[in-house]
Image: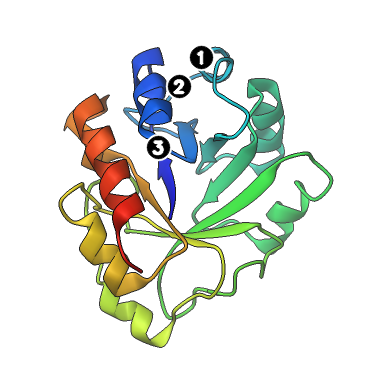
Amino acid sequence: MFVKVCGLRTAGDVRASVDAGADAVGFVFAESVRRVSVAEAKRLAEDIPDGVLTVGVFKGISAEDAAEMTLAAGMGAVQLHGDYPEEAFAVFADLPVRVIRANVLTAETDVRVGAFGEDLLLLDSKVAGSGEQWDLGLLDNARPEGRWILAGGLRPETVASAIAAARPWGVDVSSGVESSRGVKDPDLIRAFVAAAQSARV
């Protein structure tokens, strides 16, 4: 199970996530209590092992600006969250980064992984980072195939059951491993990664 820990802001956050065995770590450049600057993300990413994917998370920022910031921060991937059109993803076609398309699941959502040229698809709750879990029953009629990531309201004590219900390729957590809004808890990070990695799909 691929595990991404998102919304990291400190060296301690990064160390806890990497030591716990996370496959990817996310840095939020969008408007958020978890927002970091390009310089901060670059500094935090410097000591991350090559096997851990670094992801810049964007919403409400143009694809061109997101591409520039992603490269400047040295990220290995970009996550475009929300109503980005297909042409926005074309901006990254020739760049040395992986691309994640992040959406809320609605009747209009294209759940084909790669439909916009992305490498991974992420399905999240209506308000990213809010800790709200969405109705996984919606997947009964629109379940993606391939490399897709489940996000939204996951916590150490609920991630195993969510994985069993949704059968994703990976999971993403942010608020579910925080002691207070925007403040990561190393113990919760360790518990989440362990629970996710041991869950049965």
Q: Which mark is residue 6?
A: 3
Mark 2, residue position: 36
Residue 32 versus residue 104 in the image, above or below: above
Going 78% across and 39% down the picture, which residue do you hit?
Answer: 96
Q: Secondary structure at mark 3?
A: loop
Image coordinates for residue 180, horizontal then vertical, percent: 16, 28
Is 2 displayed left or right of 92 in the figure?
left
Which of the 4 quarters of the picture holds residue 110?
Answer: bottom right
Amino acid type shown at disc 3: Cys
Is 201 displayed left or right of 40 in the figure?
left
Mark 1, residue position: 40
Which of the 4 quarters of the picture holds residue 162?
Answer: bottom left
Is 125 displayed left or right of 18 in the figure?
left
Is 122 displayed left or right of 194 in the figure?
right
Front residue of this view, candidates 43 and 37: 43
Confirm or deny contact between disc 1 and disc 3 (CB under 8 A).
no
Q: CA distance from mark 1 to mark 3?
A: 15 Å
Image coordinates for residue 29, horizontal then vertical, percent: 50, 30
Going 47% across and 34% down the picture, which residue do you hit?
Answer: 25
